[in-house]
Amino acid sequence: MKAGGRRLSSLVDKILYGLVLAGLLLLLPVLQSWETLPEGGVWGVVKLALLALMVVAPIATRRRLRLHLAVVLSLLLLGGVLFALNQGLLREPPSERDALILRRAAVLLASPEAWDRGEQRSCSEKAGRLTLYCALRRASLEEVGSFRHRRPALQLVRIEIGHLRPQASYEHRLSGFNSDPDVTFADLHRLLAASLARVEAELRE
């Protein structure tokens, strides 16, 4: 009876450990990588491969404790780095591509008629008018071939929004700024120009 109880307790412990580990790996490497890595093309395959790695690696090493711990800690560390990038705790320096994206976004929003003042963050490829977020997304796809939410160009726009509207408490800075009734078309282009100026200044350093 005692042996049976120990086996049951051991099984419960393994199940609980597996659930906790699965939750941590899903929260850190998997979800954070989908936010950090670009959309489309080969990156979709990379994301799926990372998801498979999260499942296979801990299971494949479960009988070798040291290797298992090393694998799990490495995956969690990777997730922690991606989380820090997503939260702006680690800052990726901008490149010339970020300048191209901001210039293209300004062209896409060249007139008030091209600007969609809505707050939605879902973008249609055939939309006649664009929100700030969708203009940055389209500019990324046109200039770089992929889009990621946290690339330096978009992060610097978020930072500049904080400078231009310090009293505003937007849940999502890009969509909040875009749909703010107090924001004018001139404010929109002032934001893009300030963001571009910041990128160019960092490239000169």
Image (cartoon, helix red, strand yellow):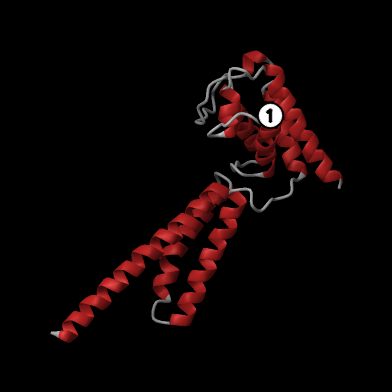
Residue displayed at 63% across by 48% down: 88
| Count of labels in the image | 1
Rendered position, 14 above or below 156: below
Residue displayed at 27% across by 78% down: 10
For this view, does 112 lie left or right of residue 94? Answer: left
Q: How crowded is mark 1: few (under 14 residues within 10 Å), some or many (20 or more)?
A: many
Q: Dot 1 corresponds to which residue?
A: 105
Image coords of residue 91 (percent x, y): 69, 50
Q: Which residue lies furthest to the left in this view?
A: 1
Q: In front here: 88 or 46?
A: 88
Rendered position, 153 above or below 22: above
For this view, does 122 lie left or right of residue 180? Answer: left
Residue displayed at 50% across by 27% down: 120
Rendered position, 119 above or below 79: above
> Quick one: SS at disc 1?
helix
Image coords of residue 115 (percent x, y): 62, 19
Question: Which quarter of the figure is the N terminus placed in?
Answer: bottom left
Q: Residue furthest top?
A: 113
Residue 131 seen by the camera: no
Quadrant of res 199 = top right
Residue 93 seen by the camera: yes
Quadrant of res 204 = top right
Which amino acid type is marked by label 1? Ala
Residue displayed at 43% across by 70% down: 58
Image coords of residue 155 (percent x, y): 66, 41
Image coords of residue 90 (percent x, y): 66, 53
Quadrant of res 153 = top right
Q: Which residue lies furthest to the right in this view?
A: 204
Rendered position, 84 above or below 195: below
